[in-house]
Image (cartoon, helix red, strand yellow):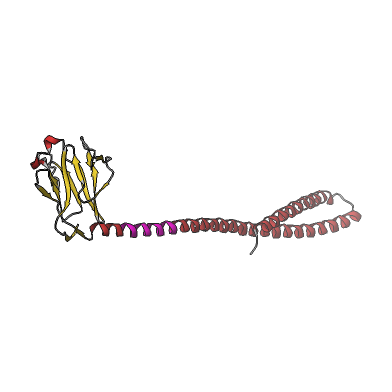
Amino acid sequence: MTNRPGLEQEIAEARRRIAGVQEEIKAIRGYISANEHVLQGQPESLRAITQEGLSKARANLAQKEFELQTEETLVGNNQRVLAKLIEVERKAQEVQKLERDLETLTALLERGRSDLSRLQGELHTMTGPVTIPAFTLLLGDGRTIPLPTDRAELLVGCQDQEDRIFPDVDLAPFGARTQGVSRRHAVLRWVGQHWTVTDLGSSNGTFVNEAAALPNVPTVVQEASRLRFGAFTVTLRSANPGKTMRL
């Protein structure tokens, strides 16, 4: 395939030849014009010589005009080839860029598929069948509050029907409001084989064995741990085995 530098050089050389031929044609036409003008006034002895010179000049002019036409045709053809070559190079660069983009998109696609698979696995873990053991919250006076076993996340607080807040573990019936328990006080979560408690930014805090739980940070709660929501204290106790439920 013709390369671009070689083609550009060939076009440049042809243009130089065209310029030279055009100069020659201009000179020949000038010679013909001058001699045709003086031909009629020449004596018979010189006219034959002038006509012979004109005849040779016209033949040379025809040859030079043919050469000019050939060179111009060559330049025109090469310019079209060069334009197509430039178009091919531009398209090749575009294809290379698209191939690089494709590699990037393929990598992103594989990463996305991997993330999707991971998230689907996490979702299955969160929503698939789990066994939640039965636990209770033991009050100081011996009363117990059973923890639901049909979900792994339990909102602890005090019910407020007006604002439609209905905690999974409602401490209001046990006088918790007067002891600083918020409507949305904390969350108990069953994670793997243990519970965690997460304070939800409550006004009076959440404590595990009298250690303050940081807001919105899960804290592990072992069996027999003392939980304090504000001033309301309970003990986490294991009860009967739980049941397998889909969350």
The N terminus - image quarter: bottom right
The C terminus - image quarter: bottom left
Q: Which of 50/27 is in front?
A: 27
Is 117 magenta? The answer is yes
Q: Position of residue 109 (x, y in %)?
A: 40, 58
Is 115 magenta? The answer is yes
Q: Position of residue 208 (x, y in %)?
A: 23, 43
- In the shown orientation, is residue 80 left or right of residue 243? right
Counting every numbered tag in the picture gives: 0
Q: Which residue ends up furthest to the bottom in the rendered image?
A: 1
- In the shown orientation, is residue 164 left or right of residue 98? left
Residue 72 visible, this angle:
no
Q: Which of 126/199 is in front?
A: 199
Q: Which of 47/221 is in front?
A: 221
- Quadrant housing residue 6: bottom right
- Quadrant housing residue 193: bottom left
Main SS of the magenta part reads: helix
Q: Position of residue 38 (x, y in %)?
A: 84, 49
Q: Position of residue 66 (x, y in %)?
A: 72, 60
Q: Which residue ends up furthest to the right in the rendered image?
A: 45
Residue 63 visible, this angle:
yes
The residue that appears at 67% across and 58% down in the rendered structure is: 7
Q: Which span of residues is magenta-colored?
A: 106-119
